[in-house]
Amino acid sequence: MAGTKAPVARPLSPHLQIYRMTLTMAMSIIHRITGGALYLGTLLLAWWLIAAASGPTAFGTAQWFLSSFLGRLILFGYTWALLHHMLGGIRHFIWDLGYGFGPSDREWLTRATLIGSVGLTLLVWMVGYFGLGGGR
Amino acid sequence: MSMRTPLGRVRGLGSAKSGTEHFWQQRVTAVALVPLTVAFVAILVSLLGRNHAAVVQILGSPPVAILMVLFVLAGCWHMRLGMQVIIEDYVHGETSKLVLLMLNTFFTVAVCLAAIFAVLKISFGV
């Protein structure tokens, strides 16, 4: 039967391990990882909102966890992941519109996203700590 | 027996049969999420150090509650699409892929509904 012949072994494109890691490639991977982290982070948001809706006792428990060292670490990571993913998204909009594909543009955009996300995260936390009583 | 090549057969049918729709919804929610994320972060920062009564009062005020609901709605829609792509990229077994795609929908819908329910309960007050 000619129809049952095994499929031809067609060439496949090489995958991650064959390329030299570049900053743009690392950022592409980080964009996906931060997206996955934010996916899980919504559980935390839903839990906190439900606690607030349930009353002072439940809210107190949520606040106790979130203001613990581990809680603050998670929130700091969540802040960075959120802002990084947002800036990465803006980078994708720029590409969607057909701009920023040149070698220097790519590198510049990548650096701007990284510096921007770290800078914004620190800014948000400094405002929170020194301006609005997040240290309490 | 078909004389068509595998490429010819698959052309026009993306992995989900609706590639552009997926892409478009992904981008529409992404555009919406830029201002909504800024608002979300600003709201949360403004709640720092406040007690339950104050947090509930701020979260429950209509503009804040509406922004929170919009953020959760756009965010959950966006993350369902994103996780779908991750699953399709990395899970190759047909059964496990289908199960995970289904769980992805269940998870995002449940989280979305829970968060929105909480905001509405706070806002409508009880």
Image: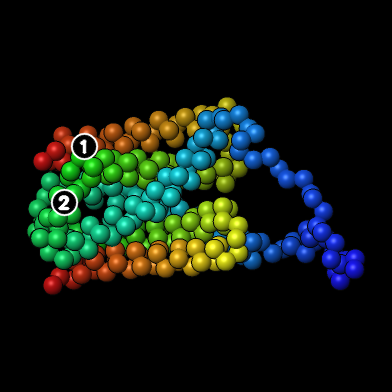
Where is the N terminus of chain A found, in terms of image quarters?
A: bottom right
Say which of B97 and A99 sits in front: B97
Where is the C terminus of chain A found, in terms of image quarters?
A: top left
Residue A127's tag is: 1
Query: Which SS class for mark 2?
Result: helix
Residue B58 x %, y %: 16, 57
Q: Residue at x 32, y 45 (%)?
A: A78
User: What's the chain of the residue with tag 1?
Assistant: A
Badges 1 and 2, same chain: yes
Q: Which quadrant of the structure image shows residue A129?
A: top left
Query: Which SS class for mark 1?
Result: helix
Residue B54 x %, y %: 10, 56
Residue A63's tag is: 2
User: What's the chain of the residue with tag 2?
Assistant: A
Amino acid type assigned to the residue bearing label 2 in the image: Gln
The mark closer to the camera, 1 or 2, is: 2
Residue A36's tag is: none
Q: Residue at x 28, y 47 (%)?
A: B41
Alpha-carbon distance for marks 1 and 2? 19 Å
| Position of A124 relative to A46 (above/below) | above
Say which of A5 and A98 sits in front: A5
Q: Residues within 10 Å of mark 2 (few under 14, many from 20)?
A: some
Q: Which quadrant of the structure image shows residue A83?
A: top left
Amino acid type assigned to the residue bearing label 1 in the image: Val
